[in-house]
Amino acid sequence: MGIVRRLSSKVVGSCSRNTYSCFNKSVDSNSSSLTHGIHVFQCPDAVGIVAKLSDCIATRGGNIIAADVFVPHNKHVFYSRTDFVFDPVKWPRLQMDQDFLNLSITFNAMRSVVRVPALDPKYKIAVLASKQNHCLVDTLHGWQDGKLPVDITCVISNHDKDSKTNVMPFLERHGIPYHHLSITADNKREGEILELVKDTDLLVLARYMQILSSNFLRSYGKDIINIHHGLLPSFKGGHPAKQAFDAGVKLIGATSHFVTEGLDAGPIIEQMVERVSHRENLQSFVQKSENLEKQCLSKAIRSYCELRVLPFEENKTVVF
């Protein structure tokens, strides 16, 4: 079993990695001059990491408002995610990068990422979809409402979204480019897709019902998030919801994960389940399944953008 350590919401200055009873002069985190930052860290486990992280922020006048630490048993690796507030005048963004880089060098870190949401560019994403629109529409509305901190560069679909759907008017109204790429068994149009998404930071497969080749994954070289049903027990092939409904299952679900060369075998980011009963008809059953998929994908995207997802071992994730 791993060890999860939660720091006090007012941890500043040096502290013991076991007690966390740290005190310093208070900082008014509601001050309008303070800005929110996030730092994630992954390095070989060692004594004093938490103290140095705290010192790095405190010596620049910052204040930790929340922090999570995970040290898996017998793995000799340290994970952390820290939320802090700071004054950008006293701690300029470039200086912050240098300070955390120095910390990374000190502890031979495998990963050290800092983001300041108010100052840094949002993640640029492209959304790929097929015939079903529920996850695509939910992602678009989440972006519109500010619930997803991303910039959508384009929508790509292998099924044409005609004017009868609510997708096209939305895209046209917001100036989001739409690309319909008809796909055949012999031509997956992957070269064209790569050209369209070359400037993105992340791809989101919103029920994109095509398998991306190993060559595509290597050529893109960045993260891709997928969503699919997690009907329990598993039903493969066409119309999985109807198969599950006909079998009388009592528990349905959805899984969001990173895309790897193994089919639906990438590290899991988020999973959700919901009970269903004998009172469901096929329509309500499908609706519940689709609602889970929308919620699960949205939460996975938010977690990714908020630096809550870190790789763990070969095929797992730490999600703070």
Image (cartoon, rainbow, N blue to C red):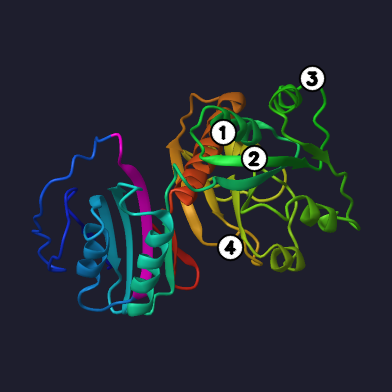
The residue identified by callout 2 is: 152
Residue reaching furthest to the top: 164
Amino acid tagged 2: Ile
Q: Is residue 242 left or right of residue 81?
A: right
The three-letter amino acid code for the residue at tag 4 is Ala
For mark 3, give the secondary structure. loop
Label for residue 265? 4
Q: Is residue 45 magenta?
A: no
Label 4: which secondary element: loop
Q: Nearer the viewer, mark 2 or mark 3?
A: 2
Element on which disc 1 rests: helix
Q: Residues within 10 Å of mark 2 (few under 14, many from 20)?
A: many
Task: Return the disc, 4 or 2, that comes first in the chain's sequence.
Answer: 2
* Earlier-in-chain disc, 3 versus 1: 1
**Amino acid type at mark 1:** Trp
Mark toward the viewer: 4 or 1: 1
Mark-to-mark CA distance, 2 and 3: 22 Å
Which image quarter: residue 243? top right
**Which mark is nearer the camera, 3 or 1?**
1
Q: CA distance from mark 3 to mark 4?
A: 35 Å
Side (left or right) of 59 relative to 89: left
> Residue at image x 73%, y 39%?
155
Q: Is residue 255 above or below residue 51?
A: above
Q: Nearer the viewer, residue 39 or 253?
A: 39
| Alpha-carbon span between mark 4 and mark 2 | 26 Å
| Residue 236 position (above or below residue 79) | above
Task: Give the image location of residue 53, x and y in percent.
Answer: 26, 65
Residue type for callout 3: Lys
Question: Which residue lies under the disc numbered 1?
Answer: 143
Magenta segment boundaries in residue numbering? 32-43
Which is more foreground, mark 3 or mark 4? 3
Tag 2 and tag 3, C-beta contact below 8 Å? no
